[in-house]
Amino acid sequence: MKQGRLIVLGVSTFLFALTGCSHYYMVNDPTGSKTYYTNDIETMSSGAIKIKDEKTGNMVTLQSSEVKEISKSEFKEALKGEKKK
C-alpha cells in the first residue's frame, strides 16, 4: 500500500516538474528600443545576457536589458504571424 502511494506521488511530482518548467520572457533592449521573446536566458560572467530571439531565430547578446516573465498566451500572441528564419 505504501509503495503504491510513493509511486503515484513520484509520478505526479515528475509530471508537475516536467510541465511547470516552461518560462516565457519578454526582453527589452533599452538602448535600441527592440523587444525580444525567448524561453531561456543565459547570464554571462560579464553580466550580459544571451538569448535566442524566438521571432527571428537569431542569437542575441545584450549588455543592458529589461527582462519580464510573461504568460504563455502573451508569448504566443507576440509570436503570432511571425515566421522563423
Image (spheres, grey):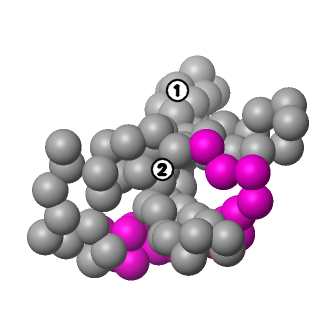
Residue under label 2, please give it. 39
Image coords of residue 68 (percent x, y) = 64, 71
Identify which amino acid the numbered label 1 is placed on: Ile
Image coords of residue 72 (percent x, y) = 39, 68
In the displayed structure image, the side of residue 12 where residue 73 appears, left or right: left
Work out whether residue 1 can be spotted.
no
Determine the residue located farthest toward the right in the rendered image: 46
| Magenta run includes residue 62 | yes
In the displayed structure image, the side of residue 46 where residue 79 appears, left or right: left
Above or below for 61 versus 73: above
Element type at mark 2:
loop
Image coords of residue 34 (percent x, y) = 50, 71
Above or below for 68 versus 17: below
Q: Earlier in the sequence, mark 1 or mark 2?
A: 1
Which quarter of the image is occupied by the N terminus? top right
| Front-lying residue, 82 or 68 | 82
In the displayed structure image, the side of residue 62 where residue 26 appears, left or right: left
Residue under label 1, please give it. 7
| Residue shown at the point (19%, 71%) measured from the top left | 80
Image coords of residue 58 (percent x, y) = 38, 42
Q: Give the range drawn in magenta.
A: 61-76
Element type at mark 1:
helix
| Front-lying residue, 18 or 43 | 43
| Residue shown at the point (47%, 63%) measured from the top left | 36
The image quadrant that residue 61 belongs to is top right
Identify which amino acid the numbered label 2 is placed on: Asn
Q: What label does residue 20 carry, if any?
A: none
| Residue shown at the point (48%, 50%) measured from the top left | 39
Q: How crowded is mark 2: few (under 14 residues within 10 Å), some or many (20 or more)?
A: some
Above or below for 85 versus 80: above
